[in-house]
Image (cartoon, helix red, strand yellow):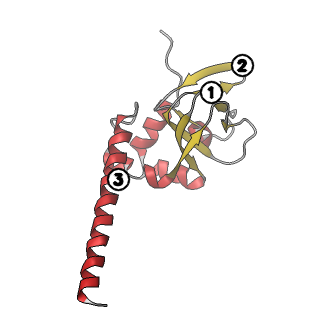
Amino acid sequence: MGRKTLTRTTMLAQQLAERKLRQQQEQMDFLHLLPGLQDVPEEELKYLPDLCTLRAFTPGQILLSEDQEGEYLYLLLQGTASLMLQDQQKLLGPGSCCGIENLFDPELPRKRLVAETYCYALQFAGPNVKMLLLALPQLSAALQQSSRPAEEP
């Protein structure tokens, strides 16, 4: 490989690395804007993008169902979704988390989550999520807090 080619390759690699760092910082900035995640330290929050998949949902599309097998949790980024458990219904918005309770207590009744509007959500799946959340106490607490119903006045 010639010197020019090596220099060009090095420059491209550096540009890609810089772009990735900018994207990671933009993700961190966005996540810190979500209700409930503002106080989570960046050293814990930085693991979120690697643990999840960004999913888009259309109105009426089911995110979680009562009979769904597996361990899933969703963090809503944009849009609204209806959370239904037995005869209760609650509208969730950005920053709301659903499904985390079943990761820590699989005996709890499963919930149904349906997109009301176009939604973007981070989807976490698999047993590794539970292990990582146990290792990241502040992130785990923030997600659990954002999954609880608001207190009635």
In this orientation, which residue lies closer to the viewer: 128 or 18?
Answer: 18
Q: Please name the amino acid that badge 2 sits on.
A: Asp
Q: Position of residue 132 (x, y in %)?
A: 48, 52
Q: Please, what secondary structure does the residue beneath circle 3 have?
A: helix
Q: Please name the amino acid that badge 3 sits on.
A: Gln
Residue named by callout 3: 24
Residue 87's disc is 2
The residues tagged by marks 2 and 3 sit, at their Cα atoms, a distance apart of 41 Å
In this orientation, which residue lies closer to the viewer: 127 or 10?
Answer: 10
- Give the class, few, some or many, for how many residues have Cα within 10 Å of label 3's Cα (few <14, many ≥20): some
Q: Please name the amino acid that badge 1 sits on.
A: Leu
Vertically, is 16 above or below 7? Answer: above
Image position of 21 (left or right of 142): left
Of the two numbered discs 3 and 1 on the same chain, state the one appearing first in sequence.
Answer: 3
Vertically, is 116 above or below 121? Answer: above
The residues tagged by marks 3 and 1 sit, at their Cα atoms, a distance apart of 30 Å
**Which label lies toward us, 1 or 2?**
1
Residue at position x 42%, y 42% in the image: 139
Residue at position x 31%, y 59% in the image: 19
Image position of 2 (left or right of 68): left
Q: Please, what secondary structure does the residue beneath circle 1 have?
A: strand
Image position of 21 (left or right of 79): left
Q: Position of residue 129 (x, y in %)?
A: 54, 51
The residues tagged by marks 1 and 2 sit, at their Cα atoms, a distance apart of 11 Å
Residue at position x 33%, y 65% in the image: 16
Residue named by callout 1: 83
Task: Report the residue that reaches farthest toward the right.
Answer: 67
- Give the class, few, some or many, for how many residues have Cα within 10 Å of label 1's Cα (few <14, many ≥20): many
For the residues bearing labels 3 and 1, Cβ distance under 8 angstroms? no
Task: Report the residue that reaches farthest toward the bottom.
Answer: 1
